[in-house]
Amino acid sequence: MSQKNETPILILSLLITTGLIAGGWWWFNRNNSFNFNSVTKPQSNQPGSNTSNTPVVPAISTPVTSGTTFASVENVPTGLFNYGGSTSWAPIRESVDKEIQAVRKDFRLRYVQPLTNIVGSSSGIQMLIDGQLAFAQSSRPLQDAELTRAKQRGFILEQIPVAIDGLAVAVNPNLNVRGLTVDQLRSIYTGKITNWKQLGGDNIPIKAYSRPVTDGGTVELFVQDVLGGQPMASTVEFIPTTTQALRKVQLSPGGIYYASAPEVIPQCSIKPLPLGRTQGKYVAPYQEPFILPSECPRLRNKLNIEALQSGDYPITRSLFVVVKQNGQTEQQAGVAYANFLRTQQGQELITRIGFVRIR
C-alpha cells in the first residue's frame, strides 16, 4: 500500500484510540468511588468558595467518619502538630487527647498558647489563620470576619462538630435561691438586678464575675445568647481563669459566675444553679438529687446529659474542630483529629468527662 493511502488510515486509527481512552477515563471516574486524595481540596461549588463578599460557614465537605476505635481511623498523618483554642476544651485535652496519642504514637499533639496569654476560641482561630496552628478547638461557630480573613489568605475554614456542651451558673453554696430564668440571668449581668432579695433570696448584694470579653468562646456565647449583645454592667468583675473565678464565688456570699458545665458541675466549693426559660420551671444542669458540698469529694455531681441532649436545659452549644481547607498536611491532621473524637471510643470518653456526645 502506498504512503498516500496509509496516511488517512493512521489518522483514523489515532482518533479512534484517543476516543476510547477518553471514554474509559470518563467511565472510571463516574463509577469508581476510590478516593485518590486523603485530604479533600476545596471545590468551586463548595460553600465558602463563593465569589461574593458575604462569607458562608461551610458545611462539612472533608471526609468525616465515625469509626469504632482510635485504631480504626484512616488517613492519619505522622508528625508533631500544633493546636490550640478554647479553654472549655481543657478536659478533652487532658483526657481524650492523651488516649489518642497513646494509641496513635506517630500522631503527636502540642497545645500552643497565644503570646498574649488570652486563651480562647477567638485566639485559637486567629492563630490558625496566621499559620501558627494545624487546627483549632472552638466552643462557638465560626464568625463572618474569620471566614473573610481566611478567604483573604487563600483558603476557607471548616467547622466539624464533635460534642455538645452547656453553660452552667455557679453561685455561693450557701445562697438560698432555687433557680434563675435566662431573663433574670441577663438582668444580673447587665446591672438591672443587683440584690438576691429581688429574686426571692436573702438581702445580699450580687457580685457577678466573668472572664474577659476578649477571651471569646464561652464569653462570646454568653454575650450573644444570654445578654442579646448587650454590654455587661460596669460592676461585673473580670477574672482571668475559671479556677480563680470559682474561688471568688466560694468566698463571696453573693457571688455568681458562668462557665462550661463540665468545669462547674463536679466542683465541691460552689453550687450549680438550675436555669429555666420561664419562672419556676427550672432544669438542673446536674443529675438530681443534688450532692451537697459536705459530701464532696467522696461524691460529686454529674452532668445532666439528657437535659442537654433534649434541649430542655436552656443554654447549650456545640464544640467544633476548626480545619483549614488548603489540601495540606495540616488539613489532614485536623480532619483526623475530628475523626478520632467522632469514633465510638472518642464519644464514650467525651461523655465520661462530662460533655454530651453528638452520635
Image (spheres, grey):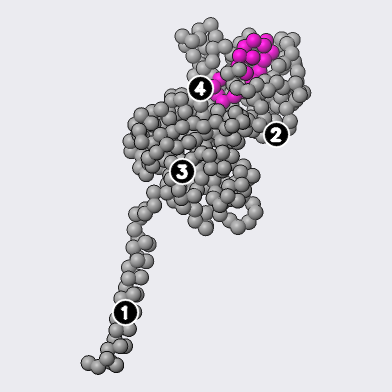
| Sequence-first tag of 4 and 1 | 1
Residues packed near mark 4 inside 10 Å, few (<14), some (14 to 19) or many (20 plus): many
- Name the amino acid type tagged 1: Leu
Residue 14 has which mark? 1
- Name the amino acid type tagged 2: Gly
Question: Could you give the CA–CA distance between mark 4 and mark 2, rounded to whole angstroms?
Answer: 26 Å
Residue, disc 3? 330
Residue ID at (59%, 26%): 167
Residue ID at (46%, 25%): 94
Residue, disc 2? 228
Picture coordinates of residue 206, whole percent (x, y)? 72, 16
Do the residues bearing badges 4 and 1 touch, measured as CB atoms within 8 Å?
A: no
| Sequence-first tag of 1 and 3 | 1
| Sequence-first tag of 2 and 1 | 1
Q: Is residue 281 above or below residue 68?
A: above
Quadrant including the N terminus:
bottom left
- Name the amino acid type tagged 4: Leu
Q: Which residues are magenta?
A: 245-264
Kindly report which numbered mark, 4 or 3, lies closer to the viewer in this rendering: 3
Magenta highlight on residue 273: no
Between 119 and 169, the one nearer to me in the picture: 119
Quadrant including the C terminus:
top left
